[in-house]
Image: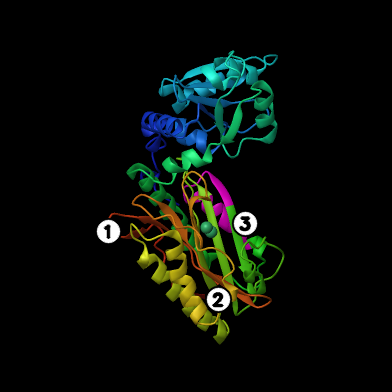
Amino acid sequence: MIEPSELPSASAPADEGATRLARAREVTAAAGIDALLVSPGADLRYLTGYHALPLERLTCLALPAAGDPFLVVPALEEPAARASAAGGLGIEIVGWDETDDPYALVARRLPGGASGTSGTGGSGRVAVDNHMWAEKLLAFRGAMPGTEQVLAGDVLRELRMRKSPAETEALRRAGAAIDRVHRRMGEWLRPGRTEQEVSRDIADAIMEAGHVTVDFVIVGSGPNGASPHHEVGERIIRSGDPVVVDIGGTTPEGYCSDSTRTYAVGEPPEEFRELYAVLERAQAAQTDAVRPGITAEQLDAVGRDIITAAGYGPHFIHRTGHGIGLSTHEEPYIVAGSDLPLEPGMAFSIEPGIYLPDRFGARIEDIVTVTEQGGERLNLTHRELTVLPAD
Ligand code: ZN
Ligand code: ZN
């Protein structure tokens, strides 16, 4: 258990809300888009601090490039919206009743060309958040005939992938929380227990460590470790098994944790030790290579070249990593083909893996943030192979 003093304050990054809205409006205008429409999810939480559940009734932030933002919410959720950080930002909150058409309501209130009902012929462009439900997107299309819809992700990524110091601090707290769970792995990972039993204990510990949700628990024992996103099952862990444990949750502030360590329960096969040594070298080289200016694909190659030179190239079957913040997977992706130069404030995983089908696999994953000088690891548990006692 953690001390209450270690619990994060629930509002630190949300204090930046006004700046984020202003920046979002700037990038929206610069992209030639008339308005952003953002439904519940990480984008809405990023922009307003409002953590609304995605449900069938429409909740939607409308942010015109020219004009004031407003938040349309079902009447029954108006009190919750007003009590949220969004209420504190001075955004106009517009409730709608069960028999109203909330899509027409948004269209009517949007200035100028975006509405399609304003007499301008609906020649505008609106950007909808990438995770808006299809039924809502199509309802907006019906309410704004002639208006073009594009993805808001291309606009918002410019903001969300560069973390403010407060966001980096929130990610550091998330990293410390998941580290506390990895440090306890010896309590649960033993021969004779199933992956499912171990994963239930891990899930409890993720909550105890200061998360409000358990987002995923991957326990891939023996041959199951060769499947990077293995679904835990009834397999009984045996002495000598390598076990890939990839776990993450969300903190009260909304920021995600994600860290993988590979353990051995008792002495693993010699070939596994050789494979692991290569992986450890690759992951260390990649985290050491993080600095402003290196591109995502260059960073991917740093680890892939080491793994390939050791003969395991075909067994590193995924990209090096993904950005992380209010979502577990977001921009920037550390992948071949991305010439995006990394910048201070970006945060992402470095998680190379080597997977030998039907035998075993290994992955080491840390969240890293780019600093002015280089990079900072946000996961600090040790990366050498941890051999847990088999009895
Ligand atoms: Zn992971
Ligand atoms: Zn990850």
Task: Tell me the tag on residue 373.
Answer: 1
Question: Alpha carbon of mark 1 to alpha carbon of mark 3: how far?
Answer: 40 Å
Q: Position of residue 177 (x, y in %)?
A: 44, 53
Q: Is residue 103 above or below residue 317?
A: above
Q: Secondary structure at mark 2?
A: helix
Q: Nearer the viewer, residue 91 or 206?
A: 91
Q: Residue at x 70, y 68 (%)?
A: 235
Q: Amino acid at mark 1?
A: Gln
Q: Is residue 59 visible?
A: yes
- Sequence-wise first label, 2 or 3: 3
Instruction: Answer whether labels 2 and 3 touch (C-beta < 8 Å).
Output: no
Q: Secondary structure at mark 3?
A: helix
Residue furthest to the bottom? 270
Horizontal arrangement in the rendering, residue 381 relative to residue 42 (left or right): left
Q: Residue at x 60, y 30 (%)?
A: 148
Q: Residue at x 47, y 75 (%)?
A: 305
Task: Tell me the tag on residue 355.
Answer: none
Q: How is the image coloured?
A: rainbow
Q: Position of residue 159 (x, y in %)?
A: 42, 40
Q: Position of residue 150 (x, y in %)?
A: 58, 35
Q: Amino acid at mark 2?
A: Gly
Residue numbers of the magenta segment: 198-215
Q: Residue at x 36, y 33 (%)?
A: 16
Q: Which residue is mark 2?
A: 313
Q: Which residue is mark 3?
A: 200
Question: Alpha carbon of mark 1 to alpha carbon of mark 2: how far?
Answer: 30 Å
Mark 2 lies within 8 Å of ligand 2 (Cβ measured): no
Question: Alpha carbon of mark 2 to alpha carbon of mark 3: how far?
Answer: 34 Å
Q: Amino acid at mark 3?
A: Arg
Q: Is residue 295 above or below residue 309?
A: above
Q: Residues within 10 Å of mark 1 (few under 14, many from 20)?
A: few
